[in-house]
Structure formats: C-alpha cells, structure tokens
Amino acid sequence: MGSGFCKSSVDGNLKYGKFTENNLNNYSSGNGTSHHLISIGNTNNQPGLENKSDTEASPLEKTTQEDFQYDIVVIGGGSGGLACAKEAATFSARVACLDFVDPSPRGSVWGLGGTCVNVGCIPKKLMHTAALLKDKVKDSEKFGWLFENGSITGHDWKILRQSVQNYVSSLNWGYKKALKDKGVKYINAKATFIDKHTIEATKKNGNKEKITSKKFVLATGGRPTYPDFPGNEFCITSDDLFSLKKCPGKTLVIGGSYVALECAGFLAGLGLDVTIYIRSILLRGFDQQMAELIGAYMKNHGVKFRRPCIPKKVEQLKDGNLKVFAFSEDEEIIETFETVFVAVGRAPCTSNIGLEKANVRLQPKTGHVLVDNREQTNVESIYAIGDICYNKPELTPVAIQAGKMLARRLFANSKEVVDYDNVPTTVFAPLEYGCIGLAEEDAIVKFGEDDIEVYHQYFEPLEWTVAERDKKYCYAKLICQKSKNQKVVGLHITGPNAGEVTQGWTIGMRMGATKTDFEETLGIHPTCSEVFTTLYITKRSEKNPAVTGC
C-alpha cells in the first residue's frame, strides 16, 4: 500500500484523450504536478508553514461562524475522509462529505469508499487469496486429500470478479448508511474552491450549488499515472483491473511498484501468462534485500521478468491484442499481449479544483499538499489528510488515523497528532512481505554502518514442510541501533501471513523495544512470528543464516 510518469498537456488534458475539468477527489492532471501551483514558501520545513491565508478575505469569507452552512466539509469519500467526517459528527459538528469519481481513461467508475475499498486493498487481497488457494489445493494432496480427477481443471474469472464486486458494493452501501446514521450530509458532487470558506459543488446532472463551511478537509487521495509513450490509451491500471468483465489473459505488467508485483502475482497465481517490465529496481523505497527475495520467488513461480526494460510504444492489432515495443539493454523487444497493465506510480488529486483560489500551497514537483504536523495547510480553514499530503505514508490506516485525530483536535480539544514513525505495512505479493521502521539501507545512512547490527535467519513455515515447498525464500531480520541498547529500528519478514505477523510486533516497536525485549518475549510454537524471538546470527559475523529446523 504506499507512491509518476503520466504526461499531460498544458491545459491538463491527457495526450490520449480530453477530460473535463476534474475535481479534487478524482483524476489528477496526470504527471503529479498541479497546473495551479502556488508560490512555495517554507517547503523544507512543513511544520513552519504559516497557518493563514496570504490573500485578502472575500465578502463571502467575512462572515461569522453562524453564517456558515457547516462546521466542517470533507472533500473526498475515501477511508480518511469518511473517518474524519464520522468522527467529527460524534461531537455534534455540522458535517458534510462530498465525493465524486471521474471515470478512468477506460471508463471505470466506482462507489463511495475511495481507492482502498473499490480499486485497492480490498479487491486486491481477495484476488490474492484466490491465487493462494490454488497452491493450498496443490499442497493438500501431500496432506492426504484425494482428488477424483487429479487436479484443478481451471479458473473462472467472471465468478471471482462478480464475488469481489458484490462484496465491494456491500461496503459502498454500508458507508452511505454509516454517514446517514452519524448525521453526516453525503453529497455526490465535484467540489471546486471559490475561496477559503466556499466551494461550488457540481452534481452529475450539471446542477451546481455553493456550500460554505468554517473548515474544509482535503481527503481526495490519488490516481494511477500513465507512462509517456504512444498507445498508452490501450493500457489499463488498478482503476480498471478488478472490474474487468473479461479475463485479462496473457498480461504485461509495467512497473516495479508494490501494486505491480501484487497484481502480477495474483494474475500468475490464477494461471495466467504474466511478464513484468521493470525500468530499474523492485519496490523503490523498501528494503532492497527483501524486494529481491520477492522477485526471486515470483520468478521461480512462473512470472517472467525483463529488467531493465523500457516500453516505447503499444499498438492495438486487428484482433484486439496489443503489440508492445520496448528496449532492454539496447536490444529491441517486440511482444504481443492481451492486456497491458501499468503500475508506475500515483499522483495526488489536487489539480483543477480551485486550490489556487483558496491559496493552498502545493509541492511544486509532485502537486502534493504541504501540511504541518497537525495536517493543516498554510490556510487556516483548510486541512489535508491521506495520500495527497507531501512526504506522508500513502496507506489507508494512516489516512484513517489522521482523519480521526484531526476531528478530535478540531471539536474535542485533543492535542494528539499522528505518529508517523514505525508505520507497519505489507506487500501482498505471492510471497508476502511485512515491514516496520527503517530499511537496512536507510538505517545505515541514518546511523552509520558501525552503529547498526542486523540479526537474520531463514525459516521454514511448518505448513511448507510436508508440502515440500522451497525453503530459501522465507526470511526475517531485525535491524538494531547498537548505541541505543540495541533498539530495534527495522523489522522485516517474507513468508505466509506476513501482514498478520508484522501487525503484532508494531506495538513493541512503537514502545522502543530492544533486541533483548524480543529475546525475552515467549514465542508461540510453531508459528512464523516466533522467529523474531530466536534470532542470534548477525550479518557482521558472516555465519550462514540458513534454516536449521523447527
């Protein structure tokens, strides 16, 4: 979950298709750079942002609190926006939540709930689970299960798609009901700022209304970006994949992001022919040793990699298939696929919604909103949470926490702010990868190699033993700072259920756990998580960390 190359013309229209004016919680301008950038002040020190507007108040702004229609209006109905709106309503605030989804270039739309629920975490993990079930069925023969016809006969994409979409639709309905039950006014409309206390809401039928509020919260998230090459209009993104009516078939995945690896992984697990084109490294921003383990596991399980490889053009053939032209180490590659899926990054949805009229400052290169440690922009009446915030983790739980805490500060006199250190996350690749804290490379940069001790071990999940799976991929390591009593500053694991394992250790990391604390913690046997209680081999010792037994 965490992250462009999409190009757009000066007026904000994608090269391959003109778009109407987008709102804040929908499609961005593409390359992550807003076309309404405000002059940046103190960009290197976000907490130092001045919490006041640099413009003279308009007549609409010169009102008393009683003149505003709402105490707070949340723009964006994703995880963070919904959490903020519902929390604010519990304190008797007058709350409205606006949400509107502009179609993707391929025409995909969805309901209330944002990226995670509709085109992200939820459908992704359900399809990941579908792929894992294939391996479990195969393993079951070694555990004594008998099959009349010997093996699985195939997979029905339509059944999986419909089952996933049915569940997602139930969540969409649930969110609407939750807003109503909390007394939040839900408005399905695009929002454009007129000034710092006023927006114009445009509904699907074109009807417009002005809405005033004492406070606004930007919670509009991001959208996938597109590579800049001819034929990118034939590609799909995560906005489209989970609702495809037809099985993707032979698929090319472009990118080395976590979205790319997760989607390539479950497509291959469903039995499809999958190739990944990667410009340079896997999982940029993550621990590179762990990233390479994931790549090796996927390659060993049928995913083909071309690396380094840069796509140059996509052509649609008469039969509907796609011919892809690329270069790999000065060699021209020409291959044909049924689907080309791009996952090269995401851009914040901050363009073409009037932020310049409210004088909200953005990061000039990426278009992200600049906020301080209280999620406040440079404008006293406007806040921002979630993926649109500059230099914040782009994760659903982070947005939810930020939304709740912001509402409590605004309406319940709370002083608590989000702790952005030791944020746990998991990459749901075929071999799951969970982590908390610093990557090994980052720890060395921050503390120096001499002050870092890395404890590591390969391990074999018990359920993999009878199934005779390869034991060289499940791996755990703790990164410790020697000068701080071996305080654990990074935890990393690849293996089954890595997300569940990682979540359990997060509280210890937040409380400053040391290597001794891990050693004195009793493990649950036999589990994968217990490996962290028994690590003793250091990288510095150069001893072999191979699997030694249960």
Image (tube, rainbow, N blue to C red):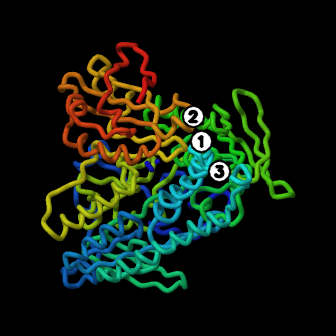
Residue 316 x %, y %: 80, 54
- The amino acid type, in three-letter code, at marker 1 is Lys
Instruction: Please state if 22 lies on the left or on the right of 537 as rendered.
Output: right
Label pair 1/3, CB-CB below 8 angstroms: no
- Pair 3/2: label in front: 3
Q: Secondary structure at mark 1?
A: helix
Q: Amino acid at mark 3?
A: Leu
Crowding at label 3, few (<14), some or many (≥20) Cα neighbours within 10 Å? Answer: few
Identify which residue, 355 or 442, lies in the foreground: 442
Q: Is residue 29 visible?
A: no
Residue in the image at 46% along x and 79% along y: 188
Q: Is residue 544 visible?
A: yes
Q: Tag 2: residue type? A: Glu
Residue topped by disc 2: 468
Residue 326 drawn at (x, y percent): 73, 38
Q: Is residue 36 above or below residue 451?
A: below
Relative to 503, residue 199 above or below: below
Q: Which residue is mark 3?
A: 146
Residues at discs 1 and 2 in contact (Cβ within 8 Å):
yes
Q: On the rendered structure, is 105 left or right of 176?
A: right
The label nearer to you, 1 versus 2, is 1
Mark 1 or 2 closer to N-term? 1
Residue for badge 1:
142
Q: Secondary structure at mark 2?
A: loop
Q: Give whichever of 266, 227 is nearer the camera.
A: 266
